[in-house]
Amino acid sequence: MTKIKTLADLLKIKEEVQSKTKLREKSDHPEQLVQVKVGMATCGIASGAKETMKYFIDELEQQAIDALVTQTGCMGYCYAEPTVEVILAGKDPVVFGFVNKEKAEEIIDVYIKRGELVDGVIPLSFRTIDD
Amino acid sequence: MKTISDHMLDIVQNSVRAKATLIEIIVVEDNVSDFYAIHFNDNACGMSKDTLGQATNPFFTSRTTRKVGLGLSLLKYNALASNGSFSIDSEIGKGTRVKAVFQLSHLDRPPAGDTWNSLYLIMMSNHDSRVVYRHQTPEGTFKLDSAELKQMLGGVSLQQAEIKKAVIELIKNNLEDIKASK
């Protein structure tokens, strides 16, 4: 294969991809997707959020899970970076702390695929009786 | 921050949070004059004089989730530690310009790092801003414009595995071509 250097080379790849697979419509119904938000402020980046985010993109794509992976700012849990907020369709957001590659794998396998909670949740959606 | 590419990812977040629609990242390096400069220009809301004076103070931040703001402070520190310079300039309603210069051969200059990953992540996750990256070395210039990229891709997501691989490879090959510093 020739080296990819220009946008024209990229266009070829895109056409190949388009013809091979029926593309999944992603952004049209974000509420039906799994949303993964990786905390990517200074604290997150310094703790390796870039690797975590790359891992989520790769794995979710490979396992053909419809997901939208995005960056978000600091959620105030700098001690627990990298943090990841996962929103499953119709459920409250859940924030996980200390998400390295191993943790990310566990989150995908156990929480995203089976809906069972795993250790390491930061109680973001905690509500008092008055709320 | 271990690498300059980490700083890139970090500083761009400031512009994104300030609702920039155009973010320029310009790297100029020269091994003869021995410098590595990185500029961030945006057209976001800008800062007042007071805020600007506080911007590189690590104990100042405009956000409410925590009390420290280290992004610009760390970049400034790294630039000064490698015999470089740092400047920030902003005008309300016009935008902000950040410039960090490193001495290219200085032992304390952080490595450039995986610019391709940073750039990919920036372009993938910011749908509302156009990101223009330009990297200039004595060997040549590499330019990547997220608007052109997205137009070419049409509706195809950057998250698509093959596209992701291709975009990262494109950036890597071009940086190699112009002999970008590591």
Image: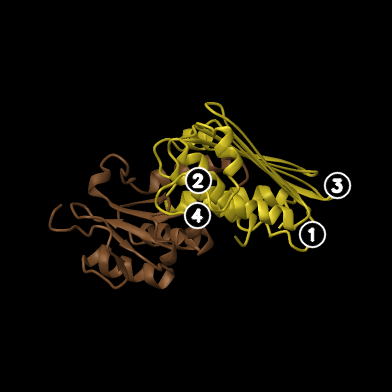
Chain colours: A brown, B yellow
Mark 3 crowd level (few <14, some 14–19, many ≥20, 10 Å Cα): few
If you read the primary sequence from the N terminus, does the residue marked by circle 2 or circle 1 appear first?
Answer: 2
Residues marked 2 and 4 touching at CB (< 8 Å): no
Circle 1 — which element?
loop
Q: Where is residue A76, by image quadrant? A: bottom left
Name the image quarter holding the C terminus of chain B. Answer: bottom right
Q: Check disc 4 and report the residue beneath it.
A: B68
Mark 2 crowd level (few <14, some 14–19, many ≥20, 10 Å Cα): many
Question: Residue lying farthest left?
Answer: A129
If you read the primary sequence from the N terminus, does the residue marked by circle 3 or circle 2 appear first?
Answer: 2
Q: Is residue B76 above or below residue B28?
A: below
Q: Which amino acid type is shown beneath numbered disc 1?
A: His
In three-dimensional space, the C-alpha distance between marks 2 and 1, rounded to whole angstroms, equals: 27 Å
Mark 3 vs mark 2: tell me if same chain: yes
Q: Check disc 3 and report the residue beneath it.
A: B33
Q: Locate residue A119 relative to residue B52 in the image: left or right.
A: left
Q: Check disc 2 and report the residue beneath it.
A: B13
Mark 1 vs mark 3: tell me if same chain: yes
Dot 4 falls on which chain?
Answer: B
Mark 4 vs mark 1: tell me if same chain: yes
Q: Is residue B165 above or below residue A119?
A: above
Q: Which amino acid type is shown beneath numbered disc 3?
A: Ser
Q: Which amino acid type is shown beneath numbered disc 4?
A: Val
In three-dimensional space, the C-alpha distance between marks 4 and 3, rounded to whole angstroms, equals: 36 Å
Q: Residue at x 36, y 48 (%)?
A: A21
Circle 4 — which element?
loop
Residues marked 1 and 3 touching at CB (< 8 Å): no
Q: Check disc 1 and report the residue beneath it.
A: B106
If you read the primary sequence from the N terminus, does the residue marked by circle 1 or circle 3 appear first?
Answer: 3
In three-dimensional space, the C-alpha distance between marks 2 and 4, rounded to whole angstroms, equals: 15 Å
Q: Position of residue A49 (x, y in %)?
A: 47, 60
